Image (tube, rainbow, N blue to C red):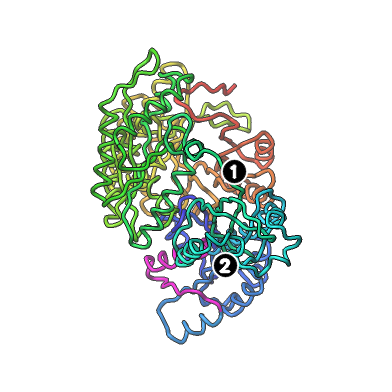
């Protein structure tokens, strides 16, 4: 599912059974799909939801409360692009035909979660693509409108040509060739603008472009105006569209006759980066586009490499900001020497470079290793300073299977980032071996996580949590960080891999152990500090976690009530029996237990009938843009009122401004945290007084 971890799917479920609907939501969330569910109870509520809320997907079952036909009719009447998926117990041919006729796009088997997930992912991906296409079309229309206005006012003589005939020309073009209005030139062949001695050669150029060949960057001819006068000109071609029709944009420029050698020097300067002397990015991208076009026609194989110095952010201050250009120039010289004349070399970014080489995958990899080794063996002297600089090289083998600029650049960038994670290494994507880079990356992360658990690679940062109701309590939340290549990474970078390889329980125990150790250190300094720690369901049935809590609390002399443990609402719901057993085992230790992301389910308070926490952390969607969203304000007030009645405290995260904090206080929220209160950091130095 595209961007499944970054996007929230706004899901509408039509089902008589709330339990079945909650199971569907849990299935999606457990697979890593973030959802914001809604379940209307009757047709009037369905109409209200469709009219007031954005909906991405609809899952509809054969329901008594809202008949299927009524659902499809209301969605069709809304005029919105909302894919509908029918939830069924089995595939029935007549049912499928009828559903398709009523606008249902797919059927998902309710009792086969893997099938449901596959259908939801497919429909979401298709919807995402359709929305993207509509945005692109709108942007294209706006771009065409602006381009047309720019062309009309441009001083450059510009014309649009379809099948060799003029279909559009601006004022500068008409003036150059002696025409008063476009009516005078409409329908005239572009060949008529070329002097007779150049007609045959120009015909051959037009034929080659009509077959799909890339036009030359520039084409020099003698042009002829309406009166037959001839003048030297340079033509530039670009594939374009005009009023939805594919055509060719032609720019004529008068050519001043001067020293050819000087002209070549000027053109070379135009194509090169002034600091490094390498090709600049626009010129290099023309070479890449030509290579991709050739590869798409099976006329060659090419490799694209991106080169970045390791730890540049730390290296630059050592060299000195005033010597940045000198450093880039020195790096460029080593790169050019290591590559030689066998490839195109360019400065691709502020401190990155690119190489385009022709050859098979093995040759591309060999060149990448050659570049890396050349830097590793070099000592750079910049002024009075010297340093060794290693580089990471990422790349992609361009071929028929990956012959679009977007794919090529995306793959090359991914491999570069993967190489940078390791440092001083190379990663080249081979379309024939798609999983090679990813598998190596995952194995590296697994080894890195295990090393962090055994050593000191993990760190805890602490964010203050402020009480709004006047209680003097020193409370922090602990956040896990992983030191990697001189940077601190958040858990989102590695927890998915840790989960797949059974390492979450070990990470949970590490965090709890070090959190208790910090609480003990604070007690020795005279502070009664409380700390919130997030755990995952892997700890619910982990006997070592209970043993760790009991042992560390006793050994460190820390009362259990100073440790607040919390887990996501959706995870507790789907692991309820284990969560209940964990709660029963932790209660004698005095630790407080809470739920986070509370309010994200269809009926979150239903869970509290089976699992009694001491605190609730509100789902972040309620506090994001809280001050301007009335719906969220009402929801928070409802949650706090019901929580207070059950003697449960509430915590709001991601508070970004004073207005939001004031509104949360009015809504009865007990605690707040976020950047406005205080950022997370390695020290506990917040003033709670």
Q: Which residue is drawn at 49% across and 40% down?
A: 260
Closer to us: mark 2 or mark 1?
1
Label 1 neighbour load within 10 Å: few <14, some 14-19, many 20+: few
**Figure check: 308 above or below 41:** above
Q: Mark 1 points at which residue?
A: 256
**In terms of sequence position, does the residue under pointer 2 or pointer 1 come before the other?**
2
360 and 193: which is toward the camera:
193
In the image, is residue 161 part of the stretch drawn in magenta?
Answer: no
Check residue 107 for magenta coloring.
yes
Residue to which mark 2 is pinned: 164
User: Residue at left 63%, top 47%?
Assistant: 636
Considering the numbered disc 1 on the image, is that residue within a helix, a strand or a loop? loop
Give the image location of residue 252, x and y in percent.
61, 53
Which quadrant of the rendered structure holds the C terminus?
top right
Magenta segment boundaries in residue numbering: 103-129
Front one among 85 and 406: 406
């Amino acid at each position: 599912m595209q961007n499944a971890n970054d996007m929230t799917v706004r899901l509408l479920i039509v089902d008589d059974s709330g339990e079945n609907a909650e199971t569907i939501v849990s299935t999606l969330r457990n697979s890593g799909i973030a959802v914001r569910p809604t379940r209307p109870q009757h047709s009037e509520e369905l109409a209200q939801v469709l009219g007031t809320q954005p909906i991405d997907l609809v899952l509809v079952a054969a329901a008594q409360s809202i008949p299927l036909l009524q659902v499809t009719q209301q969605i069709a009447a809304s005029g919105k692009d909302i894919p509908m998926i029918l939830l069924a117990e089995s595939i029935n041919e007549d049912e499928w035909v009828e559903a398709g006729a009523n606008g249902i796009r797919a059927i998902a088997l309710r009792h086969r979660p893997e099938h449901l997930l596959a259908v939801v992912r497919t429909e979401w991906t298709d919807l995402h693509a359709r929305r993207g296409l509509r945005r692109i079309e709108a942007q294209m229309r706006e771009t065409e409108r602006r381009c047309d206005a720019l062309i009309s006012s441009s001083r450059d003589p510009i014309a649009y040509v379809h099948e060799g005939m003029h279909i559009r020309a601006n004022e500068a073009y008409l003036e150059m060739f002696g025409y008063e209005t476009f009516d005078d030139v409409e329908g005239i062949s572009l060949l008529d603008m070329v002097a007779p001695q150049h007609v045959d050669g120009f015909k051959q150029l037009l034929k080659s472009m009509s077959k799909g060949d890339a036009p030359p960057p520039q084409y020099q001819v003698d042009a002829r105006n309406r009166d037959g006068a001839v003048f030297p000109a340079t033509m530039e071609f670009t594939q374009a569209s005009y009023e939805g029709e594919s055509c060719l944009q032609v720019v004529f420029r008068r050519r001043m006759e001067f020293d050819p050698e000087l002209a070549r020097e000027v053109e070379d300067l135009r194509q090169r980066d002034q600091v490094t002397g390498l090709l600049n990015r626009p010129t290099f991208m023309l070479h890449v586009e030509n290579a991709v076009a050739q590869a798409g026609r099976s006329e060659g194989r090419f490799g694209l490499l991106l080169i970045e110095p390791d730890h540049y952010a730390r290296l630059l201050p050592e060299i000195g900001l005033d010597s940045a250009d000198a450093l880039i120039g020195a790096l460029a010289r080593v790169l050019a020497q290591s590559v030689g004349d066998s490839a195109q070399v360019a400065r691709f970014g502020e401190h990155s470079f690119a190489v385009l080489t022709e050859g098979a995958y093995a040759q591309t990899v060999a060149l990448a290793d050659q570049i890396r080794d050349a830097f590793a063996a070099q000592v750079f002297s910049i002024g009075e300073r010297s340093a060794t600089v290693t580089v990471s090289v990422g790349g992609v083998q361009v071929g028929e299977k990956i012959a679009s600029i977007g794919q090529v650049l995306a793959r090359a960038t991914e491999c570069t980032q993967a190489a940078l994670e390791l440092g001083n290494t190379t990663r080249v994507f081979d379309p024939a071996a798609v999983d090679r880079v990813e598998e190596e990356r995952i194995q590296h992360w697994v080894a890195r996580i295990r090393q962090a658990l055994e050593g000191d690679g993990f760190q805890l940062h602490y964010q203050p949590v402020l009480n709004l109701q006047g209680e003097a309590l020193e409370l922090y939340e602990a956040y896990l960080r992983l030191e990697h290549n001189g940077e601190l990474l958040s858990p989102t970078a590695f927890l998915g891999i840790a989960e797949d390889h059974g390492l979450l329980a070990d990470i949970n125990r590490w965090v709890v152990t070090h959190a208790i150790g910090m609480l003990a250190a604070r007690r020795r300094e005279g502070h009664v500090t409380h700390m919130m720690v997030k755990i995952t369901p892997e700890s619910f049935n982990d006997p070592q976690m209970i043993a760790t809590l009991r042992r560390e609390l006793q050994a460190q002399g820390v009362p259990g009530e100073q440790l607040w443990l919390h887990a996501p609402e959706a995870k507790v719901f789907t692991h309820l029996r284990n969560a209940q057993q964990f709660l029963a085992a932790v209660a004698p230790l005095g630790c407080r237990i809470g739920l986070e992301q509370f309010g994200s389910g269809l009926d979150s308070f239903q869970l509290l009938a089976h699992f009694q926490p001491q605190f609730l952390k509100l789902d972040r969607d309620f506090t994001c843009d809280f001050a301007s969203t009335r719906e969220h304000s009402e929801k928070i007030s409802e949650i706090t009122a019901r929580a207070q009645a059950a003697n449960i405290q509430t915590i709001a995260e991601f508070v970004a401004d004073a207005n939001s904090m004031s509104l949360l206080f009015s809504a009865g929220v007990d605690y707040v945290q976020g950047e406005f209160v205080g950022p997370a950091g390695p020290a506990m130095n917040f003033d709670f007084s």
